[in-house]
Amino acid sequence: MKRVICLTVMNRPGVLNRITNLFSKRNFNIESISVGLSEHEGMSRITCVVHVEDSSASEQITKQLNKQIDVIKVTDITDQSIVARELALIKVQAVPYTRNEIYSLIEPFRASVIDVSKDSMTVQITGESDKVEAFIELIKPYGIKELARTGTTAFPRGTQRTSQQSKSYSIV
Amino acid sequence: MLQEAALTETKTETHPVTGADLLLRALEKENVEVIFGYPGGAVLPLYDKLYHSKILHVLPRHEQGGIHAAEGYARISGKPGVVIATSGPGATNIVTGLADAMMDSLPLIVFTGQVATGVIGSDAFQEADILGITTPITKYNYQVRSIEDIPRIIKEAFYIASTGRPGPVLIDIPKDIAAGVSDQPEEEKEVNLPGYQPTLKPNYLQIRKLTEAVSRSKKPVILAGAGVLHGRASKELKEYAEQQQVPVIHTLLGLGGFPADHPLFIGMAGMHGCYTANMGLTECDLLINIGARFDDRLTGNLQHFAPHATVAHIDIDPAEIGKNVPTSIPIVADAKEALEQLILQDGKPPAHKEWMETILRWQEEYPYFYDKESGRLKPQKVMEMLHSKTEGNAIVVTDVGQHQMWAAQYYRFNKADRWVTSGGLGTMGFGFPASIGAQLADPEACVLAICGDGGFQMSTQELAIIQEMNLPVKIIIFNNMALGMVRQWQEIFYESRFSHSKIPVQPSFVKLAEAYGIKGYVIQSEEEAEELLDEVLHNREPVLIDFRVDPDENVYPMIAPGKGLHEMAGVKP
């Protein structure tokens, strides 16, 4: 199963190495990881998407992450109501007569063209992973020259729907 | 002129200091008594300051010996062992010791030299990325980037290494930082680590839950691990076990946490544990784990482990709870605090008369055994003699292999902190240097360094420390001319194809000892052993004894890999 884990970490040298090292040491599969500054000075936010076999494995991941000295907080937000986004840049082959076709795909996905050249154009798309995935599938036939994805970054919504149980392992 | 002189006098406090000065000051502040270190290019500035220091410096003949000695020191003294190694090869030589200390939760502070900051990353002479190498095998590691940080980093390092679940912390110091000068060292501050706040106090509801579970239980056992020793909780463990009349099983590393002569003591469990302990874990209906991590050598096949039991687990490290064995009563706490709370509850002891009778019957029917009539010198007999002649008061330090298991089985520990062994990593070459650290931590104690002929040859060079410091360590070699445990497995699982496990060509260990000015003896029979041990165990001199034990002896009982605890082989003669 897929889990989305949010971490708040001290912004110290080597901290990302510690986290990725832990994943490989404990034999956990990581799908994506995204890192950036957070709302607190000196602290960064890491969002990991991992694949685990069962809930005890995901509990073990959060506990091992929590044990890291530089990690302030770990939350498995998968079961919460969350906003999750990733960004992809896609350089697609586009000769003048296919440009319009590609534009017609871009519009419903609310993607945007950020660069155009003689034989290609670069599209930027933002959204949940599934949406990005779907768009890439559609655009593939035209010939993707280059593709770069950021990986998911996420946090819980401001208001949690009451029907959904919120689950957090960070207390133990 | 005079006025000027007076001015500089009063200013001595704010004189510029070097990084090395700050480091030594910080070590003095932490009351460090001994350093195990080996000099080299990148730590020269530090060694120059050590020249005048009052801290005892022990020079091993290999960095690995130094860090194992520090581990022995840490285990016996309860204080962090301090190690210094130079950059590059010095640093990589201590890697095994770090992994060993990490596995067995031993507090260490390890300083490594590093090339100057300007050339880091350029593959400079004796450069190694020791931070990258040691990240997975340290509790935490630092590279000092500015002189002013040194006091804070060392203070934090000692705090991290010795609190919570103890472990090794490495501090990498570039040469220019150690040699560099600062006129404004950072002011003393409290340790502030928002991401590191170990839980010490147990959750009251879980304590209640456990107390009730004990009262209801018909077949309870306590499994006590090294957490009891790290938490200095053996007194509380005894009190609690007596109050509730719950029998106690030990892990390999936990030995000594509960007195072996106590009527409630069952014995050691695991791959070479006793029948009663392994059956106790299999049959129990309530398993109270205090500070053990359910290692695979203890549990055997997890599918067959404690199948009928409600599992309670007290551990200071939350990640250990539920890692290997599903746990219904999790208690994240320091062993001492949890036991104190449990004692305060004063719950109704369980009605478990039948269970205690079963345990007694097992104990009578399936004790450890060996052939006493063979006419050969049996290693088990030697262990029994060592136990009786030291009255169970010696500090026993072992290497890894058959002799380690015999020591665990036949040396009956009645006191805490008398036992040093490499459990988790199983490091050959650990025992002898660790005994040096143990002796330094407790200079009055009789320290037995129990090694195999294989493991001893991995660290013989440390005989030099024994000679130099005249440490009265008793080096006991169980010589079976083989890597005994490997040989045993090859006999049992590989149809006696003894692939590279026999070492019939050996040095004369006696002459080797004599080369270092240490008395050495070869012992072939029980009678000789009897006589010699009476003579050498009670004096204050080092000695090496080469016991030529039965080379065909195996360790039993034994649980084959993949089998459950109840599937022991060799439980009866």
Image (tube, coloured by chain):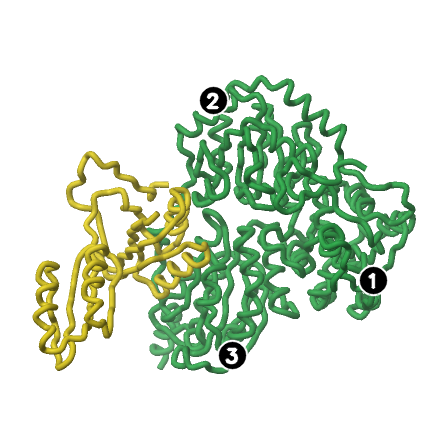
A17 left or right of B112 in image: left
Which residue was labeled with disc 2? B212
Rendered location of residue A166, percent (x, y): 26, 39
Which residue was labeled with disc 1? B519
Which residue was labeled with disc 3? B126
Query: Which chain is in green here?
Result: B
Rounded to the nearest angstrom, the CA distance separating label 1 from label 3 is 39 Å
Q: Are marks 3 and 2 on the same chain?
A: yes
Look at the numbered disc 1 and give the secondary structure of its residue. Answer: strand
Query: Which chain is in yellow here?
Result: A
Q: Are marks 2 and 1 on the same chain?
A: yes
Look at the numbered disc 2 and give the secondary structure of its residue. Answer: helix
Check the residue under mark 3 and report the chain it is in. Answer: B
Q: Residue at x 15, y 69 (%)?
A: A123
Which callout, 2 or 1, points to the residue nearer the camera?
A: 2
Rounded to the nearest angstrom, the CA distance separating label 3 from label 2 is 60 Å
Which quarter shows the C terminus of chain B?
Answer: top right
Check the residue under mark 1 and report the chain it is in. Answer: B
Rendered location of residue B29, percent (x, y): 47, 58
Image: B378 above or below B91: above
Q: Pick whichever of labels 2 and 1 is earlier in the sequence.
A: 2
- Name the residue type under label 3: Gln
Q: Residue at x 90, y 51 (%)?
A: B525
Image: B364 above or below A90: above
Image: B384 above or below B432: above
Q: Quadrant of residue B410?
A: top right
Check the residue under mark 2 and report the chain it is in. Answer: B
Rendered location of residue B450, percent (x, y): 73, 53
